[in-house]
Image (cartoon, rainbow, N blue to C red):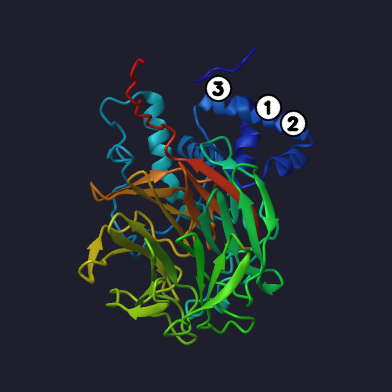
Amino acid sequence: MPSEYGEPLTERELQIVQLVAEGLTNREVALRLHISHNTIKVHLRNIFTKTGVASRTELSMLAVQEGWVKLPSLPAATEPPEGPTKLQDQEGTNLLDTEPRGSTRLTRRRRFMLGLGLLLLTFSLALPERNPLPQSASGPGEVFNSKESSALSIMEAPGGQWQELKPLPVRRAGMGAAAVANAIYVVGGMTPQGPSERFDVYDIERDAWHTAAPRPIASSNVEAVALADQILVPGGCDESLTPTAEAHLYQPETNTWTAAAPLPTPLCAYALTAIDETAYLFGGWDGERYRALAYAYHLTTDSWETLPSPARARGFGGAVAFTDRVFYIGGYDGQHELAICEMFMPSTGKWEPCPSMLQPRGGLGLAALGGRIYAIGGGWTTPLGFNERYLPTNQEWSVIETPIAGEWRNMSAVAWGTSIYAVGGWNGTDFLNRTYVIEVMPWRVFIPGTFHAP
């Protein structure tokens, strides 16, 4: 008999919930309980139906809320979180309100659980110590140090709006990505063997990868951006984790690379985006420290221009163009992730503040689509259970779901068509080859033409 919403969980289902909340995969749960992988899938479908959750993340948070998973008492936080203290959902409702008006029981529960993404931090404190990044760490050389595996290193959250696609051919993080003509181009990045010159191309229509001509140099902590059907890739870190000023342009039609004007300063771990035929580069690591700097690259003149500096020195932030302005969001200053948001106006050359994200995010991916900005990933020092969406017209951040909870950073996020694609990344212990997509504009508007009878 099929399960229904509201039915109590069986003893076996509660066992599975406990293991899922600990971060075990389906196969690991099956091995632990000595039952088949397919049986676990059936149990999870029944659990999702009975509880009304839509992902493993929500299920884990519900388990905490209902007392199915016990956490030890923890000392009160000594510092308030950076950014706003009230989480809001996509309609502007406070996610921490226990009785939002006009909501059904299911809607209240799901809103409450999404707001409890912050409880992943509590999980991380309750589990064995993760050997965190040293507070004195500074440069990109400290970014991909493996730590002991923990239950929060990677917690998959299938069953939601994110769909998994064909995996990236080589596991890596800190690579550049850009979309041109129904294809996503992924260049460079850090692999288990070191910085790479690889150049992989994802065919969106065929869900297939192939390899293109490699970049002339190996590079990690690098970005890429499309400029007039070409792809600009400046800087990056080499094998010795020293930044370079070299820049290159890739021509998809001929599968060839050409040298572009070098950066004014050798850099890696910067943020990069473009408006029309001008690329905007912010921040980054110069080999000694993180910088508060800004450059514009003009394709028509193959030249770099120095722009007014942003307020905060940092690397591993995200940049995205939105209409006639550029947002520079998040990042890492060598000790802390940041929730900061700054907005650059190319027409005036001035910087303006914008509302901080709900949570600090370093190594995040940014994408703009449908009048909204999406912040994907992060979790450098604080494991995260959600992504975020910013509505510039209302100047508000809201919570959206994530395919990976915990630590997921230095991936690439690219908008194309009606969807956002997220590729690769680092989960705190290993490089990833995951490729995900979420359709954020499922409705298309068709304007009928006028029909004239003969």
Q: Locate the N terminus by quadrant.
A: top right
Considering the numbered disc 2 on the image, is that residue within a helix, a strand or a loop?
A: helix
For label 2, the residue is 38
Residue 344 seen in render: yes
- Tell me the residue that label 1 is attached to: 42
Labels 3 and 2: the sequence-earlier one: 3
Q: Position of residue 114 (x, y in %)?
A: 42, 41
Q: Is residue 391 left or right of residue 3?
A: left
* Residue positioned 26% across, 57% down in the render: 355
Label 1 Cα neighbours within 10 Å, binned few <14 / some 14-19 / many ≥20? few
Q: Which mark is residue 8?
A: 3
Amino acid at pointer 3: Pro
Q: Are marks 1 and 2 in contact (CB under 8 Å)?
A: yes
Between tags 1 and 3, which lies in front? 1
Which residue is located at x 42 percent, y 80 percent?
Answer: 290
Which quadrant holds residue 258? Answer: bottom right
Identify which amino acid the numbered label 1 is placed on.
Val
Q: What's the CA distance linking mark 1 and mark 2?
A: 6 Å
Estimate the spatial distance between the alpha carbons at disc 3 and disc 2, rounded to whole Å: 22 Å
On screen, residue 136 above or below 72: below
